[in-house]
Image: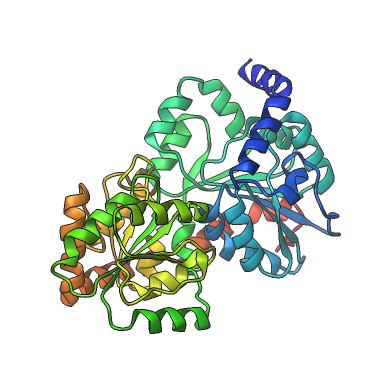
Amino acid sequence: MLQTLYRSLTTLGGPAVRLYLDRRRQAGKEDPRRRGERLGHPDRARPDGPLVWIHAASVGEANSVLALIGRLVELPARPAVLMTTGTVTSAELMDRRLPAGAFHQYVPVDLPDAAARFLDHWRPDLVLWTESEIWPNLLTAIRERRIPAALINARLSARSFRRWQLAPGFASSLLSTFRVTLAQSEGDAERLRRLGAAAATVGNLKYSAEPPPAADEALTALRAAVGGRPVWLFASSHPGEDEIAAAVHSSLAGRIDGLLTMVVPRHAHRGADILALLRGRGMAVSRRGEGALPAAGDAIYVADTMGEMGAFYRLAPVVCMGGSFVPHGGQNPLEPAMLGCAVLYGPHMWNFAEIAGQLEAAGGSMPVPDPDALADGAGRLLADGELRSRLVSAAMGVTEHNRRAIDRVFDALDPLLRDAGIRAAA
């Protein structure tokens, strides 16, 4: 009933969806050159042979499956891997980081005709969706075509679970698309089971992901510009958090000589607005998006470029994760932890609750309740190398303990790989 209603509404709502895409394009959130992909019109031919379609929402989810993609393209059958995401940021990142044999397309919007065109063109032999991406028309089309499918690194927050409980039959029908459901944590698995999925817990693929790389030339130039100044980083900031970073800097600058605060916005297109905001407060600021390096007199450096997070993490010994001081749910703390940073975050970390819980239990992170506590925590970590080392060492222990998640995921997918003819029977 709800599926039929949803399909009818999305069919009638096609013009509104196209208008929505136009507005996103005007805001810099859609690639105008590749609009056709969003409507199910691919820009390239399907490669010969077996093809695995992997879908991830955005940057974090896409990064978490890169190791899995690397293993898939090396199988004897040499399947091609079609990677879809929905954001410009993730598309640009995947174009740089996907291995040979894999390629990126934008996921089509969830209109019935777009979904049909996409699947008719690509004809995937196996579908792997990540985390909490649930698009009813696409999933229904996959199920109707009887394409083997799995939901990997599955996540379902308590908040989302309560919403899906309002339509349990609809949820169960959609989740039945997946023959295999592999959850990040037992809590996620239990919530998915209560909605009808046969979910197993195999661990979080984010632990198996490689930390973001850094270009040697860029990192060398940044280090030379910073010199010996103490540095801390507010990573993946969301609107409302740039002001927090500025307030923390003002609080600490009087007691930490030469302090440099780096702000990396979650969405690079906000760089100019952040620059104007901070200069409006009378702060000395430079912006990487304008080609600038940190100047000696700068208080804050706005690092608003794509694909350079690895360099910024390697530059800053103390990192605060954005999205955690506004009700967004936080950003992934594992990447800086893997690179030897001492990690702090605010009270809103529900998107990474399992990871944050493990780090905190081991003493590998510093959760803080509010911006005032952030200033105190960041100041202590910058001043106390021993405290910083304890956090880093504990976090490294957590990441190493969980690194084999990729092996468990690959083993659990083995029956689907064999049924799809991608892995030969033993």
The foreground one among 408 and 110 is 110
State which quadrant residue 253 falls in.
bottom left
Determine if residue 70 is in view.
no
The x, y position of residue 74, in whole percent, is: 69, 70
Counting from the top left corner in percent of width and height, residue 273 is at: 44, 51
Name the residue at 15% across, 59% down: 376
Displayed quadrant of residue 191: top left
Residue at 86% from the left image edge and 59% from the top image edge: 48
Q: Residue furthest left?
A: 255
Residue 340 or residue 273, whichever sits in front? 273
The image shows a total of numbered marks equal to 0
Is residue 379 toward the left or the right of residue 394 in the image? Answer: left
The colour style of the image is rainbow
Where in the figure is residue 418, as x and y percent of width and height?
71, 55
**In screen coordinates, is 223 left or right of 108?**
left
Q: Quadrant of residue 69?
A: bottom right
Rendered position, 188 above or below 388: above
Q: Is residue 156 visible?
A: yes
Nearer the observer, 186 or 105: 105
Vertical relation: 269 (above or below) 299: above
Say left or right for 68 vs 160: right
Look at the picture and state if 347 lies above or below 260: above
Q: Quadrant of the C terminus?
A: bottom right
Residue visible at 44% across and 74% down?
Answer: 293
Image quarter (top left, top right, bottom left or bottom right) of the N terminus:
top right
State the residue at coordinates (54%, 60%). 63
Q: x, y percentage for residue 61?
A: 53, 53
